[in-house]
Amino acid sequence: MFRKTLLATLVFAASMSVAAADEIRRIHSEARMIDLVAAHTYKDAKGNWVRINANGTMVGQYGGKSLNANWVWSGAYWCRNGHLGGAEIGSDCQEFYASRTQFHTIRNKGKGDWSSLMTRQ
């Protein structure tokens, strides 16, 4: 009985540490954002997708429209500017939150709307 309880406790503790390691956290540097997110394709629940590249570009599709944009890191913010379906989307610096499998942003330097949660494919 003791061995079963000990084994169950160890399995539970190991699963909790894996979950904690993949917790979404605020990203404060370009290097960390690139390490976590760059060169992977992410999708949201609506089927929109994006790929953020380490070279400062990103591509994707939102609402059936093609996304082509550039990004830079400025202070503590991820800033993007580009076109969605040929229309200018404007510049916006955003708080960036990520784990190894997901990310989202909060527009207007953390004072605006949350973006959709994007999950690595």
Image: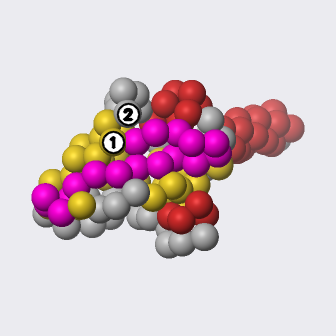
> What label does residue 70 carry, if any?
1
Q: Measure the C-alpha gap from mark 1 to mark 2.
A: 5 Å
Q: Position of residue 18 (x, y in %)?
A: 64, 38
Which residue in the protein does label 2 denote? 56
Category of crowding for the residue at label 2, using alpha-carbon neighbours closer than 10 angstroms: few (below 14), some (14–19), many (at least 20)? some
Q: Label 1 is placed on what type of residue?
A: Asn
The part of the chain drawn in magenta is 71-87
Q: Please report the residue visible at 57 percent of the width from the left and 42 percent of the height from the top.
A: 74
Residue at 50%, 72% (x, y): give it. Answer: 113
Is 72 within the magenta? yes
Question: Residue 109: horizontal and vertical position, in percent?
Answer: 59, 60
- Whether pointer 1 and pointer 2 mark residues with C-beta atoms closer than 8 Å, the reply is yes
Q: Earlier in the sequence, mark 1 or mark 2?
A: 2
47 above or below 30?
below
Residue 105 is situated, as x and y percent measured from the top left of the image, at: 50, 57
Image quarter (top left, top right, bottom left or bottom right) of the C terminus: top left
